[in-house]
Image (tube, grey):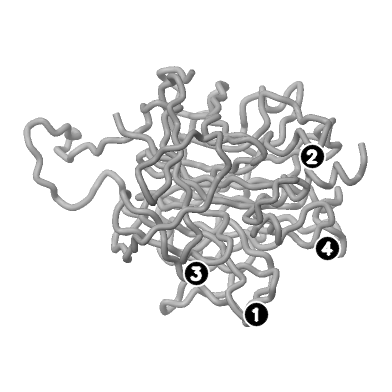
Amino acid sequence: MSPVRQAGFAAVMLAICGCTRPNPAFDPDASASQASDSDAMGSTSEPTSTTTDATDATTLPTTEDPTSITSDTSAGPTTEDPTDDPTTGPETDTDTDTETTDTGEPIEPDCWDADLHSWTITELPDGNLGINPADPWISPDGLELYYIAGPTGDQDPPQVRRIFHSTRMSRDELFVNGSKLAEWPSLNLRTAYPNSNVPGELLLSLDYDLYMSVRQDNVWLLPEILDNLSTPWGDPNKPPYVPENIIAQESINRLTEDGSRLMFVRQDGAINPDLNSPVGQFYEALREPYPVAGTPFAAPTPTVLPQALLTPYPHPILCPALSPDGRFLLFSSPYPDEVPMAPEQQYDILRTQVITRPDVDSPWSQEILQIDEFSIPEWQVCPTSITRDGCEVVFGRFLMANSPNPDTNRFRIFIATREPV
C-alpha cells in the first residue's frame, strides 16, 4: 500500500470536516468549505426518503447531488432549556383520548418505533449561519443548533473556525441565523464538534483532544483540556496521520441529555489490513447525572460494539451520534463491506449504521441496521445528533479531498425528519 493512500483515508477517519493540522493528503480548508420489534430504532419498510427544498414544496429523490437552498424564514431565541427532563413540562389541557403516564402526565408522541427508512431530508442553507458551517449538533428538544463556521474576520487566523449557535422557535422552521458563541482570540487550535447538554458547559474537540469550556458571568471561558480523556500525541512535531499520532487522537464527542455519559472516538483500535492503519474505537466516560458545569468525568472505558464490526475484519467506525437517553447509537462505517483498494471507490463508503440497547447499563445489540437513505454517490455521510423523540437526525455529507467532484462547498448539513407513530 502506498503511504499516500494510507495517509489519505486515515486523515478522513481523523478529520471529517478538515479540523486537523495541515495534511498533504487531506485539504482541511477544502473539506470544511429490518429492525426487530425489540431492538430496532424503528420498523422497516420500503424506502420513502425524500429531499426537500425549503423554498417550495417540491421533493427530490435523495440520489441527486446536494444543492444550496435559501429561505427568508427567521428564527428567534428559545427559552426552553434543553436539559429539562423530557417527561415533564408546563401543564397542558388534555382530553380523555390523550395517553398519560401512571402519574397522569401526557405522553408525547415519538418516532422510536417509526419506519427507519422513511425520511424527509432537508439541507440547511448556509445563509446567515456563517462561512461553511460544519460539525452540527442539535439539542434534544430540536430547537438549538451548535456548529462551527468561519473564519469570521481579521481577529481569527485563517485556519481557525469558531463555535456558532442558532435557534428556531419551532421544529417546523429551519435554522437560518447563527451567531458566534465565543471569541477566544488567543485560541488558534482547530475547533470541532461542539455540544452542550449541561447549562453553562460546552464540550468540544481542539486539534484532536477533548476540551471543556464553562460559562461565567455570561462569558464562555477559554476551553481547558480534559486530561483524563485525552492522550498526548506521540510526536507533536509530526502530522496527525503518522502512526504514533493517529492512536492518540480523540475527536467526535456526544453527551447524554442528563450530562452523565460522554461518548467519543479515539483512533486506537485494531489495524485494518487494507489501510495498514488503526480503526477507531468508541469510548464512554461517566459522571453523576445532572452535574454542575465543569464536573470532571471518570476515566473512559471502551464501548463494546457488535462483534461483526471487529471480526474477522476490523471496519473503520466514525461519527458516534448517541441519543439523548443513551439507548440508540448512529455512526458511520463501510460495514458490511470492506474498504475498497481503489481510491476512487472510497469516495462514498461511509454510510449510516444503527445499534440499540434497552438501557444504558445493557450491552449494545449485535444487530446492525443501515440507513441508506442518507447516502448519495460521491459523498461520505456522518450522523452527528438525534432529538430526544427520535424524529429528527442531523447529519453531514462531505467530500474527500481527492474527490474529483467540483463542488466547492465540501461539507453540507442536513436534517432528516420522520413522523411519529
Q: Which residue is mark 1?
A: 186
Horizontal and vertical percent position of residue 326: 46, 40
* Residue lying at 57% horizontally and 22% vertically, measured from the top left: 366
Of tags 4 and 1, the one toward the viewer is: 1
Horizontal and vertical percent position of residue 347: 72, 39
Mark 1 or mark 4, which is nearer the start of the sequence? Answer: 1
Mark 4 or mark 2, which is nearer the start of the sequence? Answer: 4
**SS for tag 4?**
loop
As drawn, which residue projects farthest toward the left?
Answer: 96
Circle 2: residue type = Pro
Is residue 219 among the parts visible in the rendering? yes
The numbered dot on residue 278 is: 2
Horizontal and vertical percent position of residue 332: 62, 37
Is residue 208 among the parts visible in the rendering? no
The numbered dot on residue 258 is: none
Alpha carbons under labels 2 and 3: distance apart: 33 Å
Q: Which residue is mark 4?
A: 236
* Residue lying at 52% horizontally and 66% vertically, measured from the top left: 130
Alpha carbons under labels 2 and 4: distance apart: 19 Å
Quarter of the figure with the N terminus: top right
Mark 3 and mark 1 in contact? Answer it, CB < 8 Å: no
Alpha carbons under labels 4 and 1: distance apart: 20 Å
Q: Which residue is mark 3?
A: 214
**SS for tag 1?**
loop
219 in relation to 77, above or below: below
Horizontal and vertical percent position of residue 270: 78, 34
